[in-house]
């Protein structure tokens, strides 16, 4: 591709905090081993407010609790997303 044919596009951010962030050893430094539902909601709310369009999430099939959290986060997204 040459510079003359380059078309500038808007910046798109994909965040993986709710997927990869739960695997961080830094959580152990704070005595936590997973994100609570409130943690997940706070993270998602901040990402949406900062304009992040793509958020990768955990697998809701892991456990009934994760499936329930997923439904709550989906409802929060529907409430906040433009």
Image (cartoon, rainbow, N blue to C red):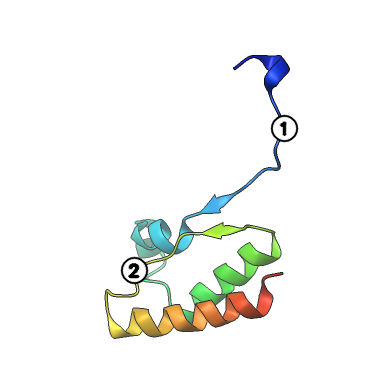
The residue under the point 36% across, 81% down is 67
Residue identified by numbered label 2:
59
Q: Position of residue 9 (x, y in %)?
A: 70, 38
Q: Which residue is mark 1?
A: 8
Q: In the image, residue 63 lies at what x, y percent?
A: 27, 80
Q: Residue at x 64, y 14 (%)?
A: 2
Residue 29 position, x and y percent, is 38, 61
Residue 80, quarter of picture: bottom right
**Label 1 crowd bin: few (<14), some (14–19), many (20+), radius 10 Å:** few
Q: Is residue 2 above or below residue 24?
A: above
The quarter of the picture where the N terminus appears is top right
Number of the front mark, 1 or 2: 1
- At a point 39% along the width and 63% down the height, the residue shown is 27
Q: Secondary structure at mark 1?
A: loop
The residue sitting at the left extreme is: 62
Asked if 21 appears above or below 82 in the picture, the reply is above
Q: Earlier in the sequence, mark 1 or mark 2?
A: 1
Q: Quadrant of residue 78?
A: bottom right
> Is 52 on the left-hand or right-hand side of 60?
right
């Amino acid at each position: 591709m040459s510079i003359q044919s380059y078309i500038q596009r808007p910046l798109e951010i994909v965040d993986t905090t709710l997927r990869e962030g739960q695997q961080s050893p830094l959580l152990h430094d704070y005595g936590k081993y997973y994100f609570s539902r409130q943690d997940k909601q706070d993270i998602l709310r901040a990402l949406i407010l900062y304009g992040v369009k793509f958020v990768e999430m955990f697998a809701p099939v892991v456990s009934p609790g994760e499936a329930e959290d997923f439904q709550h986060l989906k409802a929060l997204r529907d409430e906040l997303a433009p």
